[in-house]
């Protein structure tokens, strides 16, 4: 068992770390061994956390100026950056992602805090030309207590984009990390406390979704919920929020396509096509799990992707190879279930990476698999697999590309590869999703770029400046003065 540099069992409420009677095990996905035990917070801890957040709003935290909040966030970001290696190691152990990818997440967390630290005092209302004898203007105010329910796949990035933006706008947060991976959330809360964030501005309640998560999403003291996770739980959260008439931001799943036209620069496209499918072992909401290729270059693209797949190195997170294990045995079984659909079907496996002998026996490894000629209506081209599996499909012309790309229940991200400027604009306009990337995919994480989905991928926007509007309430003031 790897030693943890801190006690992982308490919850953080009002600046105090408290133990819970019950704990939950965390497993190291690379080995299957127990890694740590975490607090199993429930309704009582959630209630205390919401009250602490409200007290912070009524006290020291609520009295800070926007510039002071920004300075604090910037300081937390600087500490995160200083400790990026330490945070990356924790995340690699906890999530199973290769060390380099975990380090990129730690740096992204620092970037979110820098970005929202800098933005905190730059959001303001407007004056409105109105009737004679009046002055009318708008104010941007915090919601109050905000809930942040995050998944296990990118804890640091998701905490950065949601808690960072919420704190910048003066909200007080209750963070519920995922039960499968929450070490970086605990480490982040410690860093924020050390940086001088006033007590109660950030509270942390680890625990199970159906216990701590459900208690938080239905708590009447919560005024905004930011949820990232599965479509099914997103619907539960929205229903719970509806009872309290609370706004929600839902960042749900995806089945995002990258569309390669015959005129594309294939050398430029190739690394993006594969990386966006296997990064974090495919457990990425914006994974490019569908690759649509125009017929004249279909065989060439497929063969080059297959070559890359055959060369992928799979292994424990700390070995820092291309692909690590999945998060859990359950996730592995889900992905293997999808791969089982290939056996005895007309589907073609274009390539499968080898799982090396000597992988830790208890680890949750799955061989990255590239599927060819996948019918757009097939479950493998429709459902989110959340593993290192990509489905490649041929198309002819823009209209068919659009029909296939838009033909799932999801709409998160899309990539378009073409040298034709007009086509890139036509596609960008007609793709049904929240982000379109032309001749790139993901823009290196794009902290500054608003992000979110349409259809079953969710609603509301996080990241970029736009998130600050979501984490604030617009108040209109009209003063009659003759
Ligand atoms: P999940 O929905 O099971 O869990 C996400 C979070 O919700 C966890 O913290 C969990 O404890 C909590 N939760 C579970 N049940 C709950 C309940 N009844 N009430 C309140 N909270 C509850 O999702 P997951 O399996 O952890 O994550 C994978 C999914 O998340 C995938 O579908 C993926 O696409 C999606 N995801 C989306 C984004 C995005 O930004 N769009 C990012 C990452 C992951």
Image (tube, grey):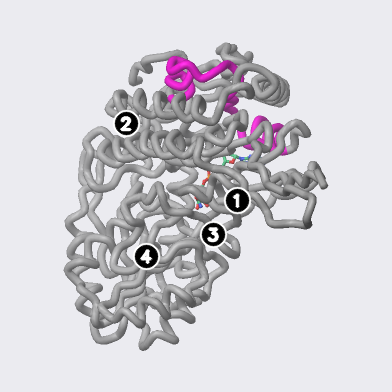
Asked if ligand 1 lies within 8 A of label 3, the reply is yes
- State the SS at label 4: strand
Q: Which mark is residue 88?
A: 2
* Mark 2 or mark 4, whichever is nearer to me: 4
* Mark closer to the chain start, 1 or 3: 1
Q: Is residue 336 above or below residue 481?
A: below
**Relative depth, front residue between 462 and 35:** 462
Crowdedness near tag 3: few (<14), some (14–19) or many (≥20) residues, C-alpha within 10 Å: many
* Mark 1 or mark 4, whichever is nearer to me: 4
Q: Which mark is residue 453?
A: 3
Q: Which mark is residue 404?
A: none
Crowdedness near tag 2: few (<14), some (14–19) or many (≥20) residues, C-alpha within 10 Å: many
* Mark closer to the chain start, 2 or 3: 2
Q: Is residue 152 visible?
A: no
Label 2 and label 4: CA atoms lie apart by 28 Å
Label 4 and label 3: CA atoms lie apart by 14 Å
Residue drawn 59% across and 12% down? 18
Image quarter for residue 60? top right
Crowdedness near tag 4: few (<14), some (14–19) or many (≥20) residues, C-alpha within 10 Å: some
- The quarter of the rendered structure image containing the N terminus is top left
- State the SS at label 3: loop
Residue drawn 46% across and 18% down? 190
- Residue under label 1: 250
Q: Is residue 480 visible?
A: yes
- Residue under label 4: 437
Give the percent coordinates (x, y) of residue 8: 48, 18
Label 2 and label 1: CA atoms lie apart by 26 Å
Q: Is residue 71 magenta?
A: no
Residue drawn 30% across and 73% down? 417
């Amino acid at each position: 068992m790897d030693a943890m540099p801190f006690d992982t069992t308490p919850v953080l409420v009002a600046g105090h770390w408290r133990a819970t009677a019950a704990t939950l095990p965390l497993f190291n996905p690379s080995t299957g061994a127990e890694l740590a035990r975490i607090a199993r917070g429930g309704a009582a801890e959630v209630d205390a956390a919401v009250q602490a957040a409200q007290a912070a709003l009524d006290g020291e935290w609520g009295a800070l100026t926007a510039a002071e909040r920004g300075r604090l966030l910037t300081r937390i970001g600087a500490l995160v950056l200083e400790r990026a290696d330490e945070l990356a190691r924790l995340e690699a152990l906890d999530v199973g992602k290769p060390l380099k990818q975990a380090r990129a997440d730690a740096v992204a967390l620092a970037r979110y805090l820098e970005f929202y630290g800098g933005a905190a005092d730059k959001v303001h209302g407007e004056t409105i030309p109105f009737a004679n004898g009046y002055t009318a203007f708008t104010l941007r105010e915090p919601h109050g207590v905000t809930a942040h329910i995050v998944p296990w796949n990118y804890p640091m990035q998701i905490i950065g984009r949601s808690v960072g933006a919420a704190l910048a706008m003066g909200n007080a947060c209750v963070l519920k990390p995922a039960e499968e991976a929450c070490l970086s959330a605990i480490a982040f809360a410690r860093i924020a406390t050390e940086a001088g964030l006033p007590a109660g501005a950030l509270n942390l309640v680890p625990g199970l979704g159906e216990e701590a998560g459900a208690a938080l999403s239905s708590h009447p003291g919560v005024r905004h919920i930011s949820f990232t996770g599965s479509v099914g739980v997103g619907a539960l959260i929205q229903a719970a929020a509806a009872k309290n008439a609370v706004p929600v931001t839902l960042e749900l799943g995806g089945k995002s396509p990258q569309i390669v036209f015959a005129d594309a620069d294939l050398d430029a496209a190739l690394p993006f096509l594969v990386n966006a499918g296997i990064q974090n072992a495919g457990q990425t909401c914006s994974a490019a799990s569908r690759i649509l290729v125009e017929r004249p270059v279909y065989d060439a693209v497929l063969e080059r992707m297959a070559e890359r797949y055959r060369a992928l190195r799979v292994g424990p997170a700390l070995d820092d190879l291309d692909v690590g294990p999945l998060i859990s045995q359950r996730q592995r079984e889900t992905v293997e279930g999808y791969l089982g659909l290939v056996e005895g079907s007309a589907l073609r496996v274009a390539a499968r990476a080898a799982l090396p002998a000597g992988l830790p026996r208890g680890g949750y490894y799955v061989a990255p698999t590239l599927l060819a000629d996948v019918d757009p209506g097939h479950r493998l081209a429709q459902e989110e697999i959340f593993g290192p599996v990509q489905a490649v499909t041929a198309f002819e012309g823009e209209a068919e590309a659009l029909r296939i790309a838009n033909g799932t229940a999801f709409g998160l991200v899309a990539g378009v590869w073409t040298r034709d400027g007009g086509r890139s604009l036509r596609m960008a306009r007609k793709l049904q999703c929240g982000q379109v990337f032309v001749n790139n995919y993901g823009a290196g994480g794009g902290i500054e770029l608003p992000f979110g989905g349409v259809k079953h991928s969710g609603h509301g926007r996080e990241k970029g400046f736009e998130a600050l509007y979501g984490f604030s309430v617009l108040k209109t003031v009209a003063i009659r003065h003759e």
